[in-house]
Image (spheres, rainbow, N blue to C red):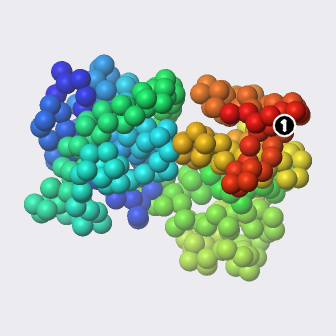
Amino acid sequence: MSTARLVAIDTEFHREKSYFAKLALVQIAADDEVFLIDPLRVDISGLRALFESDTEVVFHAAAQDLEILRRRVGVTPAKMFDTQVAAGFLGYSSASLASLLEAFLAVTLDKSDRLSDWMARPLEAKQLHYAAQDVIYLAALREALMSELEKLGRIAWLEEEMKAWVSQEFYAGTDPDRAWSKIREVRSLKGRSKHVAMALAAWREAKAIEADLPVRFVLADLAIATIAQAAPRRASDLRGIRGVDPRHLGGGADNEIIKVIAHALESEPRPHEQLAVPDSIDVPTGATTLLATWLASRARSLKIDPTLLGSRGDINEIYGGIQGAKLALGWRKEAVGDYIQRIISGEIALALTPNGDVAMVQNNHVAIT
């Protein structure tokens, strides 16, 4: 297997009732052979040599696979290809493997066992057949996608994106000190409320990791934001706060929460927190919405997945001149970032076209293509 030029990998797992995903099956396809590995009986750390080699590992929608494999193998592949990301550069938005195989290879997958209990043993023959399908066509799909990307001159864009994926730290878990950043309700808070919410998010994450439970089983996102704003001083006050489920306050959790709040209110934010948690970027009213509308229009004209291009948060970062803003780097800079900078500076403007798209126009109103 280690001598193969391409190796396709997929995993089956469960994480509905745990913090860490429970790996149930590893599927590998190489040189027209498919291997189904039972990680409940086999140590898969031997995949490390493959991941550290020059072999390209092909996935579909790799994020969760990489997280799980990083935890079990110790590393993620040095060279990888994600068919979902590649399809994004062709205009497919978060496309399923089944839809891509249908579109590019005229292959129809049987997805009837998608919700199987993969931890059950022995696995049924139909489950094994389903699992094998998820890898057996990936190499051919990769070639078909690369052919289309070459026609559009986007292979360099994809290669850049894949290098960024490889460089990411994929691990099962979130740094408790950064857990706040995943909570939408917390990101908009300011001052002491944000500081308290950050502390509560860190506490929740650590508790979830320790108990191997989903974070929502410890405390809801909404509860963290509302508790932070109310800043109660007594455990009994928690029960009247919106979003707080009394079931999550048992076993002394209510007293722990009050202690976390008190400590956050009494302490000053640490320097690294101050740097990592700037208040909301000051963007003129309507600017984000206008640019987001243009970004969606631009994605349609480029035939690229708009979510691959960037989010409203990414727009705010480039507008605010944040160092390392995603839209100011690499292929995104070429595709949209440079234009956004010119829009912000007033060099070019946006105009609505007869077909409803948002076009860029110069001061002389000549359309820019």
Seen at 75% across and 68% down, the residue is 226
Q: Is residue 255 above or below residue 270?
A: below
Q: Mark 1: which secondary structure?
A: loop
Which residue is denoted by mark 1 in the rendering? 365
Total of numbered circles in the picture? 1
- Could one spot residue 15 in this view of the protein? yes
User: How many residues crowd around disc 1 within 10 Å: few (fewer than 14), some, or many (20 or more)?
Assistant: few
- Could one spot residue 71 in this view of the protein? no
Looking at the picture, tell me which residue is in the foreground, 26 or 173.
26
Question: x and y percent of residue 111 in the render?
Answer: 26, 62
Q: Is residue 300 left or right of residue 99?
A: right
Question: x and y percent of residue 112 in the render?
Answer: 24, 67
Question: x and y percent of residue 262 in the render?
Answer: 78, 58
Seen at 54% across and 42% down, the residue is 304
Q: Is residue 278 above or below residue 209?
A: above
Under mark 1, the amino acid is His
Q: Is residue 315 above or below residue 22?
A: above
Q: Is residue 101 left or right of residue 197?
A: left
Looking at the picture, tell me which residue is in the foreground, 5 or 338.
338
